[in-house]
Image (cartoon, helix red, strand yellow):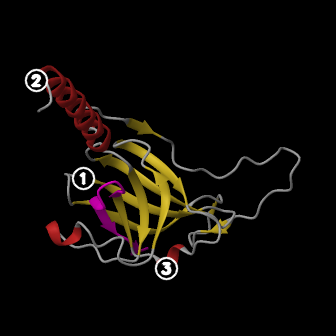
Amino acid sequence: MGMPRRLWVSVSAVVALVVVGVGLYWFQPWKLWVDETVQEAAPAAPPVAADAPEAPVADSGSGTPTPPGPVTVARGELISHEHATSGTVSLLRLPDGSHVLRLTGLNTSNGPDLRVWLTDAPVKEGRAGWHVFDDGAYESLGRLKGNKGDQNYTVPAGVDPAAFTSVSIWCDRFDVSFGAAELTRV
């Protein structure tokens, strides 16, 4: 004796709803139409208290002292991988010796579980570059704050930025690079 038709339809409907719910959670297709723009200012030299001794300044070689501030130690241009991606990546050393990765003019697709990674992988064009960034050493600098705009990501203390040669906008959910930049030392 088979399952009554009404029960079969009810069970099928519940299963279909669960499958659709899991699919929506996993793929988050609405993010394809929702942009998140972040406009963070570039890191600046920390303010000096009025009663603090004057900080030494570097000589730029022209005889004009330059105020202490962030120094660009590496730079690169983002190329597209899984999704069209563009923008500039700069690795900045702050006066206190810490480092910040700055994305400027970022423009990529939104997606589930996007991260900013420092990696030691080579940046390859096209499909050949989609999956290479988790093959070697990498350091996650956190979730991508927005898929458009200018953003800063602190490099954790104890991480040597010189050990990394590229940056990837990495989709952790699907293990694929949306875009990447080779870091060229300045």
Query: Which quadrant is the C terminus positioned in?
Result: bottom left
Q: Seen in the image, is 111 located left or right of residue 40?
A: left
* Disc 1 from disc 2: Cα separation: 51 Å
What secondary structure is found at the residue carrying circle 2?
helix
For this orientation, the residue located farthest to the front is 1
Determine whether 180 is above or below 128 in the image. above
Q: Amino acid at mark 3?
A: Ala
**Residue 164 vertical placement versus 84 (above, below):** below
Identify the residue at horizontal 57%, vertical 75% (top origin): 160
Identify the residue at the far right of this view: 51
Magenta range: 170-186
Q: Position of residue 45 (x, y in %)?
A: 65, 53
User: Would you identify the image quadrant in which residue 59 lies?
Assistant: bottom right
**Farthest top residue in view:** 6
Q: Earlier in the sequence, mark 3 or mark 2?
A: 2
Q: Which amino acid, mark 1?
A: Thr
First in residue order: circle 1 vs circle 3: 1
Q: Which residue position holds label 3?
A: 163
User: Mark 1 falls on what kind of element?
Assistant: loop
Q: Is residue 22 left or right of residue 84?
A: right
Q: Mark 2 = which residue?
A: 5
The residue beneath circle 1 is: 85
Q: Secondary structure at mark 3?
A: helix
Q: Earlier in the sequence, mark 1 or mark 2?
A: 2
- Rendered-image quadrant of the N terminus: top left
